[in-house]
Structures are given as structure tokens and as C-alpha cells.
């Protein structure tokens, strides 16, 4: 194409100039995060069900829902953070490094 200055080395390097994050699309490509995301999603669904149960006056079910939602939320966050820590360790970075995630 006219006016294009591409070489073989340009196509092999990552596009750091237009990519905001170092791991753009990682949540889709790396399926090891999915269990954590699923747990967080289920926690949100459980929270909605808990609020519905509390609104209809089912106090017992509301308390059960609160406990289940908290367990799912905490376990989902822990799973996501552990996977991010694994990815960062492969790059010799700590979890609190600003680059990437």
C-alpha cells in the first residue's frame, strides 16, 4: 500500500503505542480468571435474590442469602487476585505494580 512503512519487525512487536493496558483482553483469552468472575456474578445474583427475599419478609432466607453472597464474593475476589498474582509473578512483578492489570 502506498505510504505505509511497515517491515517484518514491526508486525512481530506488540502495539504498545495504541494499547492502553499491557494485558488488554486478558479476561477473555486467559480462562483461568473465569471461575472468579463467575463467583462474583453469582454473588451479585444472590444479592438480588436476598434483597427480594427480605422485601417479601422471608428473614430466614434473607440471612442465608447474605452469607452465601458474601462467601461467593470473597471467594471470587480471592480467585481473581490469585490469578493476577500468578500472571505478575511470571513477569517478575508484584501484584501492586501499576503496569498491566
Image (cartoon, rainbow, N blue to C red):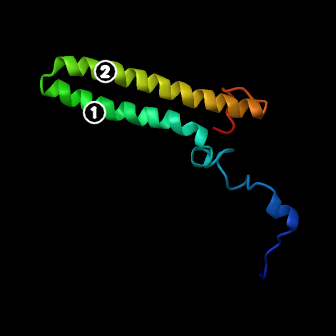
Report the residue at 68% width, 56% height from top. 18
Secondary structure at numbered mark 1? helix
Residue 37: assigned label: none
Q: Quickly name the residue at label 1.
A: 48
Neighbours of disc 2 within 10 Å: few (<14), some (14-19), many (20+): some
Using residue 80 as the reference point, say whether residue 16 is left or right of it. right
Using residue 69 as the reference point, say whether residue 52 is left or right of it. left
Q: Quickly name the residue at label 2.
A: 66
Comes first in the chain, label 2 or label 1: 1
Report the residue at 56% width, 31% height from top. 80
Report the residue at 25% width, 31% height from top. 49
* Quadrant of the rendering where the N terminus is positioned: bottom right
* Quadrant of the rendering where the C terminus is positioned: top right
Secondary structure at numbered mark 2? helix
Pick whichever, 87 or 9, lies toward us.
87
Question: In x, y percent, where is residue 7?
Answer: 86, 68
Pick whichever, 15 or 36, lies toward us.
36
Pick whichever, 84 or 16, lies toward us.
84
Using residue 77 as the reference point, say whether residue 48 is left or right of it. left
C-alpha separation, residue under disc 2 versus residue under disc 1 = 10 Å
Report the residue at 46% width, 37% height from top. 38
Which residue appears farthest toward the bottom when viewing the image?
2
Question: In x, y percent, where is residue 23?
Answer: 66, 44
Seen in the picture, residue 43 relative to 60 is either above or below; the reply is below
Question: In x, y percent, where is residue 11?
Answer: 80, 63
Amino acid at each position: 500500500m502506498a505510504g505505509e512503512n511497515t517491515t517484518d519487525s514491526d508486525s512481530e512487536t506488540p502495539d504498545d503505542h495504541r494499547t492502553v493496558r499491557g494485558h488488554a483482553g486478558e479476561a477473555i483469552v486467559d480462562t483461568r480468571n473465569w471461575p472468579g468472575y463467575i463467583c462474583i456474578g453469582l454473588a451479585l445474583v444472590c444479592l438480588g435474590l436476598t434483597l427480594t427475599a427480605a422485601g417479601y419478609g422471608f428473614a430466614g432466607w434473607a440471612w442465608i442469602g447474605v452469607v452465601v453472597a458474601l462467601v461467593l464474593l470473597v471467594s471470587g475476589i480471592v480467585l481473581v487476585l490469585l490469578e493476577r498474582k500468578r500472571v505478575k509473578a511470571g513477569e517478575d512483578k508484584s501484584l501492586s505494580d501499576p503496569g498491566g492489570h
